[in-house]
């Protein structure tokens, strides 16, 4: 008769065999994040909980500058042409001074800009990579909030889109979330009243200020980014990776911050994940990226449950 | 200790690392691919929404994934799978098939699938993920005593469902 040891060994082996036959679908983390944001908008599920749309591990900031839309780079430091580290004028107090100036700029940064955030990467498994660009903007005059998101598979297919519009409604916001499945050519609309979506630039600024306030920022030379002369600040992270923040060497406005994280949960190939974020001027050309101008022709409206049934990314 | 880092970036790192394991955990528990993927996604969604409030995201995610597999669980299907696996095992034994060990494992997994969800979850965490009793208790947010009792009842049920005579035959023939 099978003894307890054999039984447990067989159980373990059976479980391992079963586990080996399934992988996480591509883009699962990104789709989870999209859905979480939609639920926030539609169900007020996180009322009272601040949602820090925080600076990513590879944060790119372009306050008061930037080229506008379509240029998001998910490559860490892609826009920077770093020079060899060089001594700055002044003494060691410069870093503290720079940090203070940058922090002061962050107090007002991001409240009126368009935010472009792109996360990309996977877990190292073939086909696990996905890209998730997000644009958001809050109209400083009306308080209206706009956000657009896409989920793009490893083969470049746009598999899911989400557009959220929020309008102030007392102390809350009235939200409408339009969710599209470009593959099935379906869409669903959800409306609700919920908390103010804090997925906004100001939250990012606070997060970066927090990092700067840690006292661990160091100077690491200079770089030219999009024609701007910048000072390179290195921000060590407790998670074991490092962000690099570039600030304008004259105005101390944040220009760019880069970094990446490499994971290996499967013991196979490394998965490289990057997040880029730009704060862009609120020009019409930039704002339009956060909005759904009109529904594409030929799309059929379905219930959200039907959309989720047809599109795993929308679950 | 929570890392003083951006919510989304920390979540993304967590999700990228843990998504695979959550899907596998859910799949072991429920045996249904689609439901397992849904359960893992649901776990990540809820972790994201509560990121700033939970002390142990992994334990919370595992608990949520396990719980999410409970929804829509249909006993009829479990019973059907169990019966089919055991019948197949008996049939193969009668034909002196050389794969008894694997068939025994299939039957064992079918029997696992037939366990009540609470017992199955504990056994998967204990003997699949090989968590300690304390870790299992933390993950499922239940007392250690409950973990012990569910393990005892679950293993007893596995033996009962499979039957001693089946084990006797297959074990002897696969010994090496």
Image (cartoon, coloured by chain):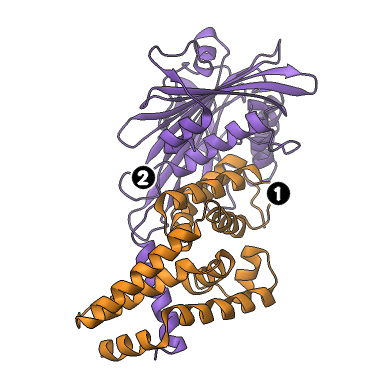
**Which chain is the one coloured purple?**
A
Disc number at residue A211? none
User: In which quadrant is the N terminus of chain A drawn?
Assistant: bottom left
**Which chain is the one coloured orange?**
B
- Residue drawn at the location 57% of the way across and 46% of the way down: B10
Q: Is residue A206 visible?
A: yes
Q: Is A8 on the left-hand or right-hand side of A33?
A: left
Of the pair A101 and A76, the residue shown nearer to us: A76
- Residue drawn at the location 61% of the way across and 46% of the way down: B46
Residue B48, quarter of the rendered image? top right
List x then y, in percent, for residue A173: 72, 22
Of the pair A218 and A78, the residue shown nearer to us: A78
What residue is shown with label 1? B53
Position of residue B86 relative to residue B80, above or below, is: below
List x then y, in percent, for residue A51: 67, 36
Q: Chain of mark 1?
A: B
Residue A46, quarter of the rendered image? top right
- Residue drawn at the location 35% of the way across and 90% of the way down: B168
């Amino acid at each position: 008769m099978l003894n307890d040891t054999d039984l447990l060994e067989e159980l373990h082996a059976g479980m391992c065999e079963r586990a080996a036959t399934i992988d996480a679908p591509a883009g699962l983390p990104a789709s989870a994040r999209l859905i979480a944001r939609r639920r926030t908008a539609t169900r007020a599920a996180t009322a009272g909980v601040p949602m820090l749309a925080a600076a990513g591990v590879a944060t790119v900031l372009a306050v008061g500058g930037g080229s506008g839309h379509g240029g998001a780079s998910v490559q860490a430091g892609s826009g920077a042409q770093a020079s060899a580290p060089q001594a700055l004028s002044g003494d060691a107090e410069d870093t503290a001074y720079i940090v203070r100036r940058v922090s002061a700029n962050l107090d007002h940064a991001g409240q009126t800009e368009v935010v472009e955030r792109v996360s990309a990467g996977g877990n190292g498994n073939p086909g696990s990579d996905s890209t998730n660009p997000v644009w958001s903007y809050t109209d400083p005059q009306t308080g209206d909030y706009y956000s657009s998101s896409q989920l793009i598979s490893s083969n470049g297919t746009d598999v899911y889109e989400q557009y959220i519009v929020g309008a102030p409604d007392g102390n809350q916001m009235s939200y409408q979330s339009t969710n599209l499945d470009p593959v099935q050519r379906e869409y669903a609309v959800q409306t609700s009243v919920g908390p103010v979506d804090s997925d906004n630039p100001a939250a990012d600024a606070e997060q970066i200020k927090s990092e700067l306030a840690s006292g661990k920022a160091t100077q690491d030379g200079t770089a030219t980014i999009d024609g701007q002369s910048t000072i390179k600040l290195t921000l060590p992270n407790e998670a074991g990776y490092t962000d690099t923040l570039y600030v304008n060497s004259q105005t101390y406005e944040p220009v760019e911050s880069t970094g990446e994280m490499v994971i290996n949960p499967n013991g196979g190939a490394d998965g490289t994940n990057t997040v880029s974020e730009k704060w862009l001027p609120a020009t019409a050309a930039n704002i339009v990226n956060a909005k759904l101008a009109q529904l594409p022709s030929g799309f059929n409206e379905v219930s959200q449950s039907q959309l989720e049934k047809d599109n795993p990314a929308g679950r | 200790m929570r890392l003083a880092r951006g919510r989304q970036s920390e979540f993304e790192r967590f999700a990228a690392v843990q998504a695979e394991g959550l899907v596998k955990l859910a799949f072991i528990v429920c045996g249904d691919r689609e439901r397992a993927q849904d359960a893992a996604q649901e776990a990540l969604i809820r972790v994201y929404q509560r990121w700033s409030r939970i002390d142990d995201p992994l334990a919370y995610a595992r608990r949520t994934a396990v719980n999410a597999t409970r929804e829509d669980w249909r006993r009829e299907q479990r019973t059907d799978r169990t019966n089919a696996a055991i019948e197949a095992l008996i049939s193969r034994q009668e034909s002196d098939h050389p794969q008894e060990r694997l068939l025994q494992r299939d039957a064992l997994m079918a029997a696992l699938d037939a366990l009540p969800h609470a017992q199955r979850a504990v056994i998967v965490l204990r003997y699949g993920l090989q968590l300690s009793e304390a870790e299992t208790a933390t993950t499922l947010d239940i007392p250690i005593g409950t973990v012990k009792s569910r393990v005892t009842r679950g293993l007893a049920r596995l033996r009962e469902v499979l039957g001693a005579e089946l084990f006797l035959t297959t074990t002897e023939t696969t010994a090496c």
